[in-house]
Image (tube, rainbow, N blue to C red):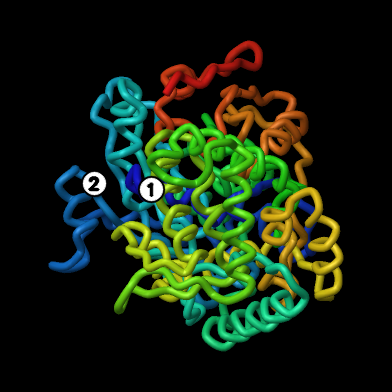
């Protein structure tokens, strides 16, 4: 949703935006006969399946630093974290075939007398790494942290785990459809071009990029760690991964915390579809905050005036790209890119994040008037990453999202949804309903996981979550009757435990992790005053 900062970016990050994050799901799914038998064999790890060598391996723990320039690795070494690679099959239906490695890290329990076991981490995204996260999570867990071996891992094809690179010239494919049919047609061409690049550079592995395979990797990690059961902390997309694991590997899990959880039906190539109302409610709440600070940001003295400023910025970007920054740090932003920035800055209602977002909107408002602008280092870096600079893992988020559920192929399907959404959701509708890169990639090999068995877990959710909506968390809770729901009222925030600073939420999660006992009934916390 990383280090505390990185985890926020991953769990709350756009990846979500649309799907981002969003979503999740689960289950013991119906799949092809071959994949079903493979999953069963994996769960049992029985002789003759060809998976024994993976389950029976023992990690070669060592330094996390991969060289003199590996600052993250050096920091992990200083914190007492050990790193290793775990071997897994590329294709679980062919365990004797090609292999890949999954990078893991471990911060060992220091209270060995009261050790509980290993807890695995996933920071969302999808595509968020977690090798770097154990030191931060130990701090979040407070007195309970020393009782766990805290295990970070980068999911297959992410970060240090046989990374996938689609060769994209951008950091994300999330865009608005814009204000016109012409801008939508440009999006169709843009998404098709990204899909073609990914197929050309990574086509041989794309069929094996899926949440079900990542869940299988998790169980291999469990076996390699010598654990009968594992505990788990998953944010955003990580909630989906966690639910999938409980369905595929019943009896292999202990204490599961799913934060910013998403229900099965809501996970897939159109992850943001259905979150328009929550996103615009969060945007409206931010507008009221900014209006009280009109003297600082100049965006309008009422909520309505601030929202009108956003509309004017989008309209101006449709007439011609806005120029922001100067010199080598200049960016051109059109009406497919500006609304993305409005979503990206709107998944957190803390004063610090709201102030940062208001500063960015002030820059865009000046650009809409043709005035010169200067970017903060943070805003410039974010624009470069999202809009111009593909990372070594560029495209992995889309590949994961596309690998679980098929997307509609016909562009007209998206255009009709976009047009229907404009009246009620003029900014968010064309983003949430825009055509996906998945429309141009191959259909996944397996059927999506379905929730077919109950699972005990703690689901954490904010009532105003603009990414994985509270409605979706409630739906998942209903599908898992033995789960308990911990609700934070009054927060427009995605990802809570250890990240948001709500003592009530943090203490209740830590009590569960310490005792293994879910509360007797669903519980509610209230947002603390700013």
Residue 313 in the figure: left or right of residue 474: left
Question: How many marks are shown on the rendered structure?
Answer: 2
Q: CA gap, disc 2 to disc 1? A: 10 Å
Q: Residue 56 falls in which quadrant of the image? A: bottom left
| Looking at the image, residue 457 lies above or below residue 126 | above
| Looking at the image, residue 429 lies above or below residue 119 | below
- Residue 323 drawn at (x, y percent): 45, 73
Identify the mark nearer the N-term, 2 or 1: 2
Of 201 and 272, the residue lying toward us: 272
* Image quadrant where one finds the C terminus: top left
**What residue is at 62 percent from the left and 33 percent from the top?**
464
Q: Decide: marks 2, 1 in contact (CB < 8 A)?
A: yes
Residue with the mark numbered 2: 81
**What residue is at 48 percent from the left and 75 percent from the top?**
332
Of 100 and 497, the residue lying toward us: 497
Q: Secondary structure at mark 1?
A: strand
| Looking at the image, residue 413 lies above or below residue 235 | below
**What residue is at 63 percent from the left and 74 percent from the top?**
319
């Amino acid at each position: 949703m990383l280090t505390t900062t990185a985890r926020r970016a991953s769990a709350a990050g756009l990846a979500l935006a649309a799907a981002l994050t969003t979503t999740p799901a689960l289950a013991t799914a119906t799949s092809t006969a071959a994949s079903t038998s493979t999953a069963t064999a994996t769960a049992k790890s029985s002789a003759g399946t060809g998976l024994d060598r993976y389950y029976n391996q023992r990690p070669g723990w060592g330094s996390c630093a991969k060289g003199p320039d590996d600052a993250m690795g050096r920091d992990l070494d200083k914190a007492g974290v050990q790193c290793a690679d775990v071997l897994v099959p590329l294709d679980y239906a062919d365990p004797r075939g090609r292999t890949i490695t999954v990078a893991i890290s471990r911060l060992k329990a220091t209270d060995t007398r009261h050790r509980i076991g290993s807890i695995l981490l996933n920071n969302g995204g999808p595509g968020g790494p977690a090798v770097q996260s154990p030191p931060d999570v130990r701090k979040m867990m407070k007195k309970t942290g020393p009782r766990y071996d805290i295990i970070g891992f980068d999911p297959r094809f992410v970060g240090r785990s046989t990374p996938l690179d689609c060769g994209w010239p951008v950091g994300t494919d999330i865009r608005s459809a814009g204000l016109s049919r012409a801008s939508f047609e440009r999006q169709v061409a843009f998404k098709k071009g990204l899909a073609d690049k990914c197929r050309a550079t990574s086509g041989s592995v794309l069929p094996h990029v899926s949440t079900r395979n990542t869940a299988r990797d998790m169980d291999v990690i469990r076996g390699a760690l010598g654990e009968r059961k594992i505990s788990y902390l998953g944010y955003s997309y990580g909630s989906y991964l966690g639910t999938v694991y409980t369905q595929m590997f019943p009896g292999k899990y202990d204490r599961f915390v799913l934060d910013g959880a998403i229900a099965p039906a809501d996970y897939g190539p159109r992850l943001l579809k259905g979150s328009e109302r929550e996103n615009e409610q969060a945007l409206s709440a931010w507008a009221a905050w900014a209006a009280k600070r009109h003297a600082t940001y100049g965006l309008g003295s009422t909520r309505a005036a601030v929202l009108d400023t956003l509309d004017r910025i989008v309209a101006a970007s449709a007439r011609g790209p806005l120029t922001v920054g100067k010199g080598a740090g200049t960016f051109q932003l059109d009406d497919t890119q500006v609304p993305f920035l409005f979503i990206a800055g709107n998944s957190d209602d803390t004063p610090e994040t709201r102030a940062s977002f208001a500063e960015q909107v002030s820059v865009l408002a000046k650009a809409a008037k043709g005035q010169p602008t200067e970017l903060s280092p943070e805003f410039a870096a974010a624009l470069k990453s999202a809009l111009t600079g593909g990372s070594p893992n560029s495209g992995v988020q889309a590949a994961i999202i596309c690998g679980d559920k098929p997307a509609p192929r016909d562009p007209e399907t998206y255009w009709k949804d976009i047009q229907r959404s404009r009246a009620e959701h003029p900014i968010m509708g064309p983003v949430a309903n825009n055509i996906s890169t998945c429309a141009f990639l191959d259909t996944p090999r397996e059927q999506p996981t379905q929730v077919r068995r109950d699972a005990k877990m703690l689901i954490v959710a904010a009532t105003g979550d603009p990414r994985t909506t509270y409605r979706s968390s409630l739906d998942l809770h209903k599908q898992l009757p033995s789960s308990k729901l911990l609700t934070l009222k009054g927060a427009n925030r995605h990802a809570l435990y250890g990240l948001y600073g709500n003592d009530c939420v943090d203490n209740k999660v830590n009590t569960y992790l310490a005792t293994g006992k879910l509360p007797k009934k669903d519980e509610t916390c209230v947002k603390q005053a700013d």
